Image: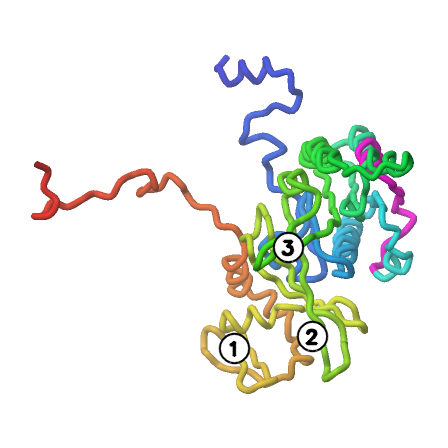
Amino acid sequence: MSILEKIKKNSTIKDSAILSKSKFFTEKDSVPTDIPMVNVALSGRLDGGLTPGLTMWAGPSKHFKTAFSLLMAKSYMDKYKDAVLLFYDSEFGTPIKYFETFGIDMERVLHTPLTNIEELKFDVMAQLEQIDRGDKIIIVIDSIGNLASKKEVEDALDGKSVADMSRAKQVKSLFRMITPHLSLKDIPMVVVNHTYKEIGMFPKDIVGGGTGSYYSADNIYILGRQQDKDGTEIKGYNFIINVEKSRYVREKSKIPITVAWEGGIQKYSGIIDIALEGGFVHKPSPGWYAKVDKKSGEVGEKKRMAETQTKEFMQPLLDDPEFQEYVKKKYEIAYSNIMGENPVLSQPAVEEDDEYINE
């Protein structure tokens, strides 16, 4: 018996395995959404998507955080017909119409109302302990940013106005406990959170909840927005997904998504911008766009922006392996051989000349 087999046999952890054969290091399940650029934000690839682990959408109020979360839940439930959604609700700001808009089967949703962080911690841990790897479940928490701690509630009932110093610890404890279960049991969890502004001359958005949520999350996206206007009329919003933290996508990437009052999320949001940058689409004059054949350089028929936002125009581009590779190289984290022929730790050779003579 080799020493590796010996220590494997002696392990008290039932899931211990040779790394090359470990079920926890196989390629993770990926659930694509219907919005290609949301897939890019989640994985760095047009054909990627949601993976098991903790994903967080953060931003101010009315920044579409819940909608992005439900989009991911819908995609998961579409892929797995027996999947269920465990929806923890602390804000009660998600009307039934939201679920209907995304086409979510409400008979497959368990709605769990919350009043404090401890309630969430105890309930979600009780659920995770009973879930087995292979059970198809997605968890959405809407939202962690609005949850008080039990102490904060008790102090209010007792008429105390002292600052609550326990909330950050409770949030950190929550995520510290659930994170291993999400990975071991292949469960995606989507959390809605708030942001606040850093104090300073050039304040930036900070994710609420202290370091606990930040350290545990696989992906953190901070949402920004600006009005989408036609003259003085507001047609919707242009959202920017700022990649604050990701295990798959280059941090600080900015991914545009347009949401219209009529029509909802525009499926092909952001594609034209990348195609222009990569030379796959040409802009012959303001307001006009044309495809470019990368091999011949031939420019196709001119079209207005609205005409480009169709399956007929976009699908050939999305199916183009060269365009897929361009997007992947732009957004996906690249892994290379750290200990290559010229490792970072090696020192460059110094050629001897009149200025470099050891005395």
Q: Which mark is residue 310?
A: 2
Q: Is residue 104 above or below residue 280?
A: above
Q: Position of residue 292 (x, y in %)?
A: 52, 77
Disc 1 to disc 3, C-alpha distance: 39 Å
Residue segment shown in magenta: 102-123
Q: Is residue 47 among the parts visible in the rendering?
A: no
Label whose residue precedes the other's in the sequence (1 or 3): 3
Residue 46, position as x, y percentages in the image: 61, 59
Q: Which amino acid type is marked by label 3?
A: Asp
- 176, 107: nearer the viewer: 176
User: Label 2: few (<14), some or many (≥20) within 10 Å?
Assistant: few
Whether residue 163 can be seen here: yes
Dot 3: few (<14), some (14–19), or many (≥20) neighbours within 10 Å?
some
In the displayed structure, 37 sits above or below 51; it is: below
**Residue at which label 3 appears:** 205
- Measured as percent of width and height from the top left, residue 68 is found at 74, 57
Q: CA distance from mark 3 to mark 2?
A: 35 Å
Q: Residue 28 appears in which quarter of the rendering? A: top right
* Kind of element beneath mark 3: strand
- Residue at the disc numbered 1: 292
